[in-house]
């Protein structure tokens, strides 16, 4: 399932290709993944005024001249801080898109035949179409006005690319959950998934079953730093294409070539050559190095041995 880097990659591609375009028509095929298909008729005539990432989903912010007063009366404070665009333009609503496991949102020439799994197509004012394809239909679309959007994002966690050291430490060290579970919890950090949780824990040398409350301030800051480094590098490399992910240009990402833990069970650790292991933490497969990322009980035993050695030397 696309995580923060993959979604950010698609958002940046769409910003270059369809930002500012007006939607002239909407075609819907299968609609079981759409919250409110009847509402999609309201998309016609609206302009794509902004395209943003929020966690693992994207928001196409819409604007037209007929509902500006209503939008200004109900600003969306929780997302993008207001309902006003950079040029003073008010957003009337937002199209929420979650790509699921196999979804793709990309522009296409109108004359190109629909892919077999095309389920939504937006006709644009430049003659192209913005098409959503999804073979497994595990994605989601919803037309959300200000109040509905605010309710949708209520309780979302901090953006891991923006969170500061103090807040990050507070969010992980105030909870007794496993650190892998905390990284995956979208109410703690929005956008992190299995891939980048495993990669950042490997870089930080922290076992995925380690309890957040038992991390030191230094360990928490190390984890924050490497998580941000990995996410930013993955964005530069257009994300990880494990099986189905393609960017807005239909191209796969490249960061999967740089994975150090995720999906590498039985392969040698890049640091110490110990075979990577897989365990289930928070209901998800977690890949780690048993030597570089010792289990919590092993850490305690190592500290006790070190303490005894220090006492014996005195």
Image (spheres, helix red, strand yellow):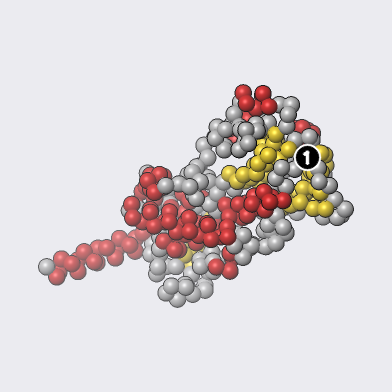
* Left/right of residue 119 with respect to residue 80 in the rendered view: right
Q: Position of residue 86 (x, y in %)?
A: 61, 38
Q: Position of residue 66 (x, y in %)?
A: 74, 26
* Left/right of residue 194 with respect to residue 87 in the rendered view: left
Q: Residue at x 78, y 40 (%)?
A: 23
Q: Position of residue 111 (x, y in %)?
A: 88, 53
Of residues 241 and 198, which is closer to you in this image? 241
Q: Position of residue 128 (x, y in %)?
A: 81, 49
**To which residue does mark 1 refer?**
23
Q: Residue at x 83, y 53 (%)?
A: 109
From where the camera sits, is residue 17 visible? yes
Please determine whether, in this image, residue 252 is positioned above or below residue 168.
below
Q: Quadrant of the N terminus?
A: bottom right
Residue 255 position by quadrant? bottom right
Of residues 117 and 96, which is closer to you in this image? 96
* Residue at the extreme left of the image, as rendered: 314
* Left/right of residue 151 with respect to residue 137 in the rendered view: left
From where the camera sits, is residue 32 visible? no
Dot 1: what SS? strand
Q: Residue at x 46, y 49 (%)?
A: 182
Please determine whether, in this image, residue 130 is positioned above or below residue 62.
below
Report crowding for label 1: few under 14, some 14 to 19, many 20 or more residues within 10 A (C-alpha).
many
* Left/right of residue 110 with respect to residue 163 in the rendered view: right
Please determine whether, in this image, residue 67 is positioned above or below residue 220.
above
Looking at the rendered structure, the number of numbered marks drawn on it comes to 1
Of residues 89 and 254, which is closer to you in this image? 89
Q: Residue at x 76, y 40 (%)?
A: 22
Q: Quadrant of the C terminus?
A: bottom left
């Amino acid at each position: 399932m696309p995580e923060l880097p993959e979604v950010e990659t698609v958002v940046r591609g769409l910003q270059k290709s369809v930002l500012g375009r007006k939607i002239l028509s909407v075609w819907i095929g299968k609609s079981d993944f759409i919250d409110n298909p009847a509402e999609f008729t309201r998309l016609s005539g609206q302009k794509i005024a902004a395209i943003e990432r929020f966690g693992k989903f994207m928001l196409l912010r819409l604007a037209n001249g007929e509902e500006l007063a209503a939008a200004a009366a109900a600003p969306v404070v929780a997302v993008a801080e207001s309902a006003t665009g950079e040029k003073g333009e008010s957003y009337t609503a937002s199209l929420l898109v979650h790509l699921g496991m196999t979804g793709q949102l990309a522009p296409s020439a109108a004359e190109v035949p629909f892919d077999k799994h095309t389920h939504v197509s937006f006709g644009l004012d430049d003659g192209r179409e913005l098409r959503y394809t999804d073979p497994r239909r595990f994605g989601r679309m919803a037309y959300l006005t200000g109040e509905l959007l605010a309710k949708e994002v209520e309780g979302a966690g901090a953006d891991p690319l923006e969170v500061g050291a103090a807040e990050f430490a507070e969010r992980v060290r105030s909870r007794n959950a496993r650190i892998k579970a905390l990284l995956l919890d979208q109410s703690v950090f929005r956008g992190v998934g299995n891939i980048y949780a495993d990669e950042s824990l490997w870089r930080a040398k922290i076992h995925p079953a380690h309890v957040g409350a038992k991390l030191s301030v230094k360990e928490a800051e190390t984890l924050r730093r490497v998580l941000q480094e990995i996410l930013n590098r993955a964005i530069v490399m257009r994300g990880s294409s494990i099986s189905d992910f393609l960017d807005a240009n239909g191209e796969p990402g490249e960061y999967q070539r740089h994975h150090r833990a995720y999906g590498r069970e039985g392969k040698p650790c890049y640091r110490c050559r110990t075979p990577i292991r897989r365990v289930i933490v928070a209901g998800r497969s977690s890949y780690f190095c048993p030597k570089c990322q010792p289990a919590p009980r092993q850490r305690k035993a190592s500290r006790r041995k070190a303490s005894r050695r220090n006492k014996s030397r005195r």
